[in-house]
Amino acid sequence: MTRAMGAAMRRIHVGNALSAFGLGFTVPYLYVYVAQVRDLGAMTAGLVLAVFAVAALIVLPFAGRAIVRRGPLPVLLAALVTAALGALSLGLASNAAAVLLSAAALGAGQAVMQPALATMIVDCSSADTRSRAFAMQFFLQNLGLGVGGLIGGHLVDVTRVSSFTLLFAIEAAMFLLLVVVMATVRMPHSPRLEDAPTQSSKGSWKQLLGNRAMVQLSVLGFVLFFACYGQFESGLSAYGVEAAGISTSALGTALAANTLMIVVAQFAVLKFVERRRRSRVIAAVGLIWAVAWLAAGYAGLGHGSQEMATAAFVSTYALFGLGEAMLSPTVAPLVADLAPEGMAGQYNSAFALVKQLALAVGPAVGGPLGASLPAPYIVTFLLFSLGITVLALRLGRRLTDVQDQPWLRTSRVIARGEAPAESLAA
């Protein structure tokens, strides 16, 4: 990695932390704000959450093409300004129509940020530094969300609309501050659609769907997000409250345990996964999450004390965090390695679209199932977790040696007796 790439990467990481910090201020309190503070009712609050998902699904297919043609930085800046306007107007909105329009702008901006930042990380990293770069991104995102949520919780007052207006104004300010930070980034030249070879320029969605390994990874990604992230604040929390008798304070402790596990374990886990096959790391995550669902099953269906049930439920979230820490340096770099030259933005946007689909379907399926049918709920997602292991091992047979074991790039150069580029330059 050159000095310029390192400087750009540091600003990108600052950007990730700022955006997560801003989101942490508002996301946990959005439902309360719309339903109770603005007194627009549970139906409108539910529609707001749905609008976030729908806006993301609408813009992401176009975002990848824009990133490929224009580069990730201009797309990111446009997304940040859109999100800032959405956040500010959401804090001022007093009727359902204004709230829904504001939520659409905020949701669209947030959705486009993800593939744009991921593509910038790809452009500013090399194959041997990419896993660590994405691990740092995930670490800072979770730290920012946790700190933002903690501070936001002390600022809000459900009896004062102005406290929520302040919250959304701070979120908008974070996005605008991020515009200033990102505007100073000097991105290294990377291939755009116009620069790419002829076979790549015809690619877009048809070429992506013709990449069997990427299609398999997308299916695997859908199951990953559906069985874990899609259950955090819907099915699993409903199951915990209804079947396991978990209090709201214990539920907060469980969510904190998830974030703490990621923050504490991320770089220790990174050392473990860096020299292992990516497909086997993902397969191991499936087994870890299967154990997590067994712990959740004990919490709600076992016959232990309430203290034991609570401990088992908290451990479920902690085990999910361990799996997430293993995935962050594995899945995103694999998406980048599967993308043809100049098409990283398209592939990142496609994978973000898969994630949004899973996050839209997951709560819709898991929420009612977790609340009303606890035993089938646990069995269903236990099977989904085991399915992750099966799908990951099948994906491994589709990957090349270098895609599954990226460190081979370096070791093969050394094995042939070739000097690294830095020493040749010297």
Image (cartoon, grey):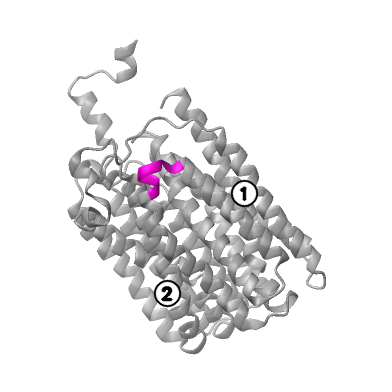
Amino acid identity at mark 1:
Phe
Indicate the position of residue 330 as horizontal and vertical percent values.
36, 49
On whether residue 71 falls in the magenta region, the answer is: yes
Question: Does residue 249 sit above or below 187 in this rendering?
Answer: below
Indicate the position of residue 67 as horizontal and vertical percent values.
40, 46
Question: Does residue 156 sit above or below 207 in this rendering?
Answer: below
Residue ID for mark 2: 361
On whether residue 336 falls in the magenta region, the answer is: no
Question: Does residue 356 sit above or below 10 in this rendering?
Answer: below
Helix, strand, or loop for circle 1? helix
Indicate the position of residue 234 as horizontal and vertical percent values.
53, 75
Look at 49% across and 85% down and name the residue there: 368
Which range of residues does the magenta coloring cover?
66-72
Horizontally, residue 72 falls left or right of residue 96, namely left
Helix, strand, or loop for circle 2? helix
Residue ID for mark 1: 175
Count residues near mark 1 (Cα–Cα under 10 Å), then give few for <14, some for 14-19, many for 20+.
many
Q: Quadrant of residue 2?
A: top left
Q: Are marks 2 and 1 in contact (CB under 8 Å)?
A: no
